[in-house]
Amino acid sequence: MSTVTIDRRVFLCGPVAGALVTARAWAQTAPVSAGPADPKLIEDLVAANRVLADQGVVDGYGHVSVRHPADPQRYLMARSIAPEMVTAGDVMEYDLDSNPVDPRGRASYLERFIHGEIYRARPDVTAVVHNHSPSVIPFGVSTAPLRPLYHMSAFLGGGVPVFDIKIAAGQATDMLVRTPALGRALAQTLGPRPVALMRGHGAVVVADSLPRAVFRSVYTEMNARLQAQAMALGGPVTYLDDEEARRAEASVAGTISRPWELWKKKALAR
Amino acid sequence: MSTVTIDRRVFLCGPVAGALVTARAWAQTAPVSAGPADPKLIEDLVAANRVLADQGVVDGYGHVSVRHPADPQRYLMARSIAPEMVTAGDVMEYDLDSNPVDPRGRASYLERFIHGEIYRARPDVTAVVHNHSPSVIPFGVSTAPLRPLYHMSAFLGGGVPVFDIKIAAGQATDMLVRTPALGRALAQTLGPRPVALMRGHGAVVVADSLPRAVFRSVYTEMNARLQAQAMALGGPVTYLDDEEARRAEASVAGTISRPWELWKKKALAR
Amino acid sequence: MSTVTIDRRVFLCGPVAGALVTARAWAQTAPVSAGPADPKLIEDLVAANRVLADQGVVDGYGHVSVRHPADPQRYLMARSIAPEMVTAGDVMEYDLDSNPVDPRGRASYLERFIHGEIYRARPDVTAVVHNHSPSVIPFGVSTAPLRPLYHMSAFLGGGVPVFDIKIAAGQATDMLVRTPALGRALAQTLGPRPVALMRGHGAVVVADSLPRAVFRSVYTEMNARLQAQAMALGGPVTYLDDEEARRAEASVAGTISRPWELWKKKALAR
Amino acid sequence: MSTVTIDRRVFLCGPVAGALVTARAWAQTAPVSAGPADPKLIEDLVAANRVLADQGVVDGYGHVSVRHPADPQRYLMARSIAPEMVTAGDVMEYDLDSNPVDPRGRASYLERFIHGEIYRARPDVTAVVHNHSPSVIPFGVSTAPLRPLYHMSAFLGGGVPVFDIKIAAGQATDMLVRTPALGRALAQTLGPRPVALMRGHGAVVVADSLPRAVFRSVYTEMNARLQAQAMALGGPVTYLDDEEARRAEASVAGTISRPWELWKKKALAR
């Protein structure tokens, strides 16, 4: 794993040199499976995909993953397919280098490195969402920071960094997080927070469970919409202060099953 | 009930002292039921929950209650569940301290004190809605007052106060109206009016009937949306004057069964 | 009919004197029917109601009428009911004083005088829509005039007046066009145009056929939305010039069956 | 046909080179068919119509065509009908003069010349969409240029010209591209790009395949919406730079089947 260490040092200094990326261990021997996951977790992963579509957080693009309960070095995510169409049979297993365990010809999302590298950098994270959440995108290309003004979005209280892939790559890119190095750079921008915006692209949202990652995705989108509206009213906007945000997040966390049960029921009924 | 009197005096002076809250009578003996309510009223309460969801006034959160027709010291509200999923079997009875009559293990909304304390303070109120109505939230964090510009929203003519829970509590809170004292503070901000905004949170809407509370919720949301758009057009905005608002509200009140029948029919058809 | 003449003169000078309104002939003998209307026209009227709801031009309120083909002194409109719920059995016949021919206990819209008085003032008009079209309301309370920037909305080219009921009534009102006198004042503001806004209330839209009145309602709403967006972009907005508007309206008029067939098919399929 | 010549001379004073127009063969004998098209292509064309409606890019108006695979001088497009209602039986064949091969009484879109003239001017183009995409229209009447701020819309990187039909025609028109000459003028404004706005009207979008033309229509609409929101936040907006746009477009092009399969499945399921 020393190459990973080197990569990280490079990130700390600035852009990733492509050479280091190639130097990285790209073992093409398929990783070993952590074994079958609980069907209830798979059902939640399928539901998460569809809920994100139902709630307008993802369209034909975007993906959501969950760490494998049996092995923190593995995660589960659908093959390359629109989230709304995901079924249990589409779920694949990956190692943290984002190599599929058993591809059987199924294509993987180009940007799966977002997931693998965040799971590597954040042992506390159990679920990752990458989306093109529409109301969030304007904040990723603006100088106006996204800030919580609504108790349901209190998790944004620690600030929402913007990942600029051009700075991370040290050059113009195709905007896609298509390498482990870029995934690590994004994870570094995210730091210990739940949400990072991606300039000209979308956002990444993480949590300690699938329902909470979905919840945070929905209420990041909502906060962005409400904040734009509040700013348009013309006067100063009162955001949650740090302590309000901290306390509200803790309280709201205990209520997430309420919308989750609603969303899941509707998503799986179709 | 002298502690209530004391609490109220304290509110008049400023923040709630936690000690007083503890001093309050928290009799944990279950209150006595006022008896079964008319099934038609229960049906209206179920419909109200679903209509509020259909109309975009509530999402997975929010709640609506109705005062018990047989006893003004009791009210009816669903257990802690998303409004869209409420059925008759979810309806519970509460006293005005917001203690459930017969919980049978069913969880209660954390913020039920909004309802109990408003029923206590406002004998004229028969129905209470608490929501996170999206277009309303920006007005709760802005210096721009919500004002009626549309005859359907004439009930806003007496002004729309903003409840800032931090001022009420005298300190940072988790933003939730989770105690009788905070419920009373909100009721005090509401005063004799039909609507109060809650900073960083949502709104509370009251009326003398369930259909009217739903109607007011829908048209508060609509007025907020239209007012933001009117303000964005750049010139001065002509709001309803006081007499127009008073007269329009009286006239519109007689027509509410028209949308209510439509909304209820659609809500119960699913 | 001399009182009508007098009323009109009064309108020209300013507010309506209530006394004149009372002086008006309120014959309560039911008017004679012009006979049954073509079921296809009734079907179109039912479809028009539902299409307006589908297109977001009306909600639980609003109404649409059509002049009786057999007698220009009669018009057809639903009883007081939400547009989306209208069926053929709800259609009633009115004379131009807006007296129902055969009410059989069915309630009439309070504001039916909008229809009767416009049919009286405008022999060229065959269909009238009154709505609370949401994007239009901000323009009715703003100093920004609604102007066509889109060829589908070219019919707005002659200008869109705003009816202020307070000026018409000479005093604060309940905002409702609840008398023949107020209906006439609105008809006078409308003049020869297809659309007038009603301050703090909505709009009235007329045409020489039901499909065209519906079409104009839909594209007045759309133009208002697009105009607000174009104004928000910050620069000058290029509106259709007078000749473009005149020519575009004439050409587009020949294409209205295309959306109408789509809308009607969907509206009646439910 | 001398009046056509005169029209052309007028066009010569503006952007369109008209001499060529006069010289063109206006044979009114029906063109010869290139033979039946692959039913799978027809299915895609039907799907494209419905997807554009589902995605809010077209309403009752707008059209999409595909070049005939057997003959680049022919294209396929529905008869004059709302896109959402198109079925395989509605598809007609046209030559590049936009004469129908076998009309059998079916009406053609007035503006079919948009398609014929773009296919003539752009051998690289296989599919053409003309729409009244709502968020795009404000940019067509504003001085604010539409620019890509989102990697999915990177295809806008080469700039988005605005076609002003009044300048093209040298005089006020009915805003419709109702002649070959106007179609050629539009094709000239489009140049080598994928998208041109049409002032006061809508847009034209082209690509080398039907799915890609639909994709570009959807994400032109999305970019316009997001750009308006980003501009409203008040600060400078960071757009994709030229190289980012070029690279992102190339990469995203490889992923279009993902949303297309989703959209098509839903469109054909109804």
Image (spheres, coloured by chain):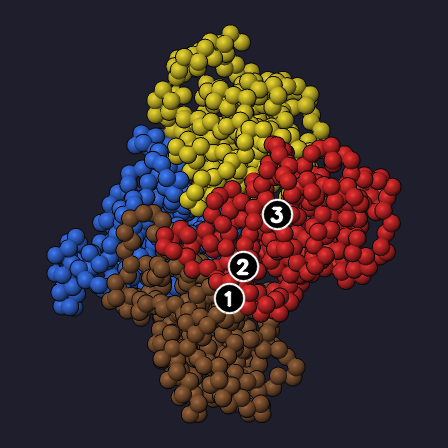
Chain colours: A yellow, B red, C brown, D blue
Whether the residues at callouts 3 and 1 have beta carbons within 8 Å, the answer is no
Q: Amino acid at mark 3?
A: Thr
Place of residue A266 in the rendered image (x, y in percent of width and height, measured from the top left): 65, 46
10 Å crowding of disc 2: few (<14), some (14-19), many (20+): many
**What residue do we see at 52% from left, 21% from top?**
A191
Q: Which mark is residue B244?
A: 1
Q: Which mark is residue B157?
A: 2
Q: Secondary structure at mark 3?
A: helix
How far separated are the C-alphas under marks 2 and 3? 16 Å
**What residue do we see at 65% from left, 24% from top?**
A68
Mark before the other along the chain sequence, 1 or 2: 2
Do the residues at pointers 1 and 2 share their chain? Answer: yes
The residue wearing badge 3 is B189
Q: Is residue D110 above or below residue A50?
A: below
Quarter of image, res D170: bottom left
Q: Disc 1 is attached to a residue of which chain?
A: B
Total labels drawn: 3
Q: Nearer the viewer, residue A252 or A111?
A: A252
Q: Nearer the viewer, residue A117 or D19?
A: A117
**What residue do we see at 29% from left, 66% from top?**
C245
